[in-house]
Each structure stands twice: as structure tokens, then as C-alpha cells.
Image (tube, rainbow, N blue to C red):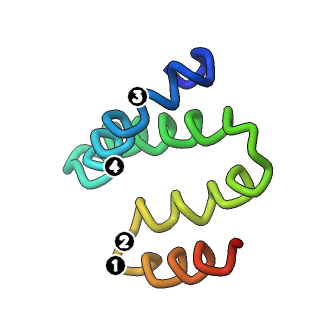
Amino acid sequence: MAYCAPVQLSQCLLKIVPKLTEMLTDTHPKVQDAGQTALQQVGSVIKNLEISALVPTLLMGLTDPNEYTQHSLGILLQVG
């Protein structure tokens, strides 16, 4: 899905990202790794330079929300 046309991908993000985020908290490490890889692939096709620069920060916030949500939101608020 990450390598579809940008319009197709953007139309599906609202469904895809929450499902992939759920995978990050799965009990099986391989499922967690697959979710992380898929989110990285989706993030790698973003063409907007400001947004693509934030992908690692966003992934940290999604991967470990207890540790990185506040940090990630702080960085997002600075983008303007």
C-alpha cells in the first residue's frame, strides 16, 4: 500500500494508520516489527519535506506513546 499513487494512499491513511498503530502493541514481536516496518514504509513515500522530516518523531510517539507523546506533540506544535 505504501507504494500506491499518493492520492490513493492519502485516501486510505485514516484507516491504515490506526490499524498499524494497533499492531505496535501486539504481544507478538513479529507483529510489532511488521507494524513498525509498514508505518516506516508509509512515511517514506511522503513528498512534503516538512512532514517527511517529522516521520521519525511521529513514529516514536506511536511506538511508545507513554514515553514520547509529549515530546512528539511539542515538535509538531513548533511546525508552522
Q: Earlier in the sequence, mark 3 or mark 2?
A: 3
Q: Left of 65 or right of it: where is 45? A: right
Q: Secondary structure at mark 2?
A: helix
Q: Residue furthest front?
A: 80
**Which residue is tagged 1?**
66
Q: Separation of disc 4 and disc 2 at Cα?
A: 10 Å
Q: Amino acid at mark 3?
A: Cys
Q: Earlier in the sequence, mark 4 or mark 1?
A: 4
Q: Separation of disc 4 and disc 3 at Cα?
A: 14 Å
Mark 3 vs mark 2: give the one in front.
3
Q: Left of 48 or right of it: where is 74? A: left
The residue that appears at 59% across and 79% down in the rendered structure is: 77
Q: Are marks 4 and 3 in contact (CB under 8 Å)?
A: no
Q: Secondary structure at mark 3?
A: helix
Q: Quadrant of residue 33?
A: top left
Mark 4 vs mark 3: give the one in front.
3
Q: Are marks 2 and 1 in contact (CB under 8 Å)?
A: yes
What is the x, y in percent for residue 17? 38, 42
Q: Amino acid at mark 2?
A: Pro
**Which residue is tagged 3?**
12
Q: Amino acid at mark 1?
A: Asn
Question: Where residue 65 is drawn, which disc sits there?
Answer: 2
